[in-house]
Amino acid sequence: MSRVTPVVLVIVLAACALSCGVNVDGSPRVVGVGAPVYGRPVSDFVRAELAVAAAARAVEPCGLLDAAGVASFGVLTAYGPAGDLSTCHAEVIPPGGTPVDPSWIEVVVGEREPSEGVGRGRAAGGIEVRPALSPLPGTCTLYFSLPPVPGVAAQRWGHVSYLDGAAGVVRPAAGDDCAEASAVLAAVTARLHSTPRSTTNIPLAQQDPCRVVENVTELEITTFAPGSRPYECRLTLGRGDEASVRFALSTPPPRTGGPEVVEIDGESFAFFEDALECHYYFYPGDVVDTNVQHSPMSEMARRGNRLTASVAATARDCEEAQMLVLAAAEMFDY
């Protein structure tokens, strides 16, 4: 994207040791299993987490972010889904600003918990709101609780963020920018009560990455649970190693200078390996152009707002990462 906020980039994977013996973002251990989900027996805790993650995926983030309301902040240049499919973003040139430094507004849904320190909560239409503490200059982030799932104690959160592109440039005396974030949050709260269901042409947005377990054996994957975002599934492999399958929206891979392209069982995947893990990707679906028609942004900035869905499989062992990406490709390659 043309501009990425720290809020989009920072996702804290919380590892909570729970009384039922499940470590959600680490190595979940099944204790007291019940009826199967995706053909695998899971604990009551994991079942609840799957239900809450599914409810979060049912809330379309761009059904919460009011494009007309955002346009009141300036000239709207980009609007649409972004990040890990649980994000809707907009870019606006504020009064006195330039296309080089647009303001950035985002709505994210489905976080297991706020990913940064937050202040005391308050009620907003029956929804709990907590402001982020120590925001960066020119930013404001407000976390809000998603409506509860009946009969389930687990909870998911969302947040509204505003990054003032003009702060420190043409408006050095700007405030904390919570006026804009609060206005967006008011619209979000109203729409949450009406259960927004906007249509999307991204098939992955209706899918659960944990469905990948249907295509692998119990010897290959022993446990699974949703990650810190609803489009991530954390897996425990047969040897006890951790792995993941994630959905995202990202800029299409460059023809040169990007990840290596490898062929596995006759299919092509993007690949890179770091000091800890192997990562395989594939890109199903068409490019989603989130640029507003006649946007005054430069072509370089516009390229950053043309996104494509991606599926990533990550594991410590490259052969296990290959196993996961092949299973995901069979399940999710649209």
Image (cartoon, helix red, strand yellow):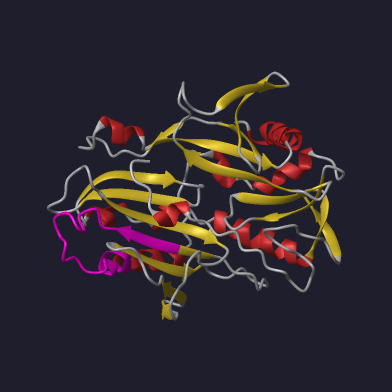
> Residue at 82% across / 48% down in the picture?
39
Residue 65 shown left or right of residue 232 in the figure? left
Front-most of residues 100 and 146? 100
The residues colored magenta run: 159-182
Residue 290: percent from left, percent from top = 36, 39
> Residue at 48% across / 63% down in the picture?
158
Residue 215: percent from left, percent from top = 77, 38
> Residue at 49% across / 27% down in the picture?
258
Front-most of residues 46 and 244? 244
Total tally of numbered discs in the picture: 0
Residue 303: percent from left, percent from top = 34, 32
Question: Relative to 264, does residue 250 appear above or below in the rendering?
Answer: below
> Residue at 81% across / 50% down in the picture?
240
Is 175 in the magenta? yes
Question: Relative to 182, does residue 106 appear above or below in the rendering?
Answer: above
Would you identify the image quadrant in which residue 167 lies? bottom left
Front-most of residues 314 and 53? 314
Q: Quadrant of the N terminus?
A: top left
* Residue sitting farthest toward the front: 275
Is 135 in the magenta? no
Front-most of residues 13 and 36? 13
Question: Relative to 243, does residue 50 appear above or below in the rendering?
Answer: below
Residue 264 shown left or right of residue 197 in the figure? right
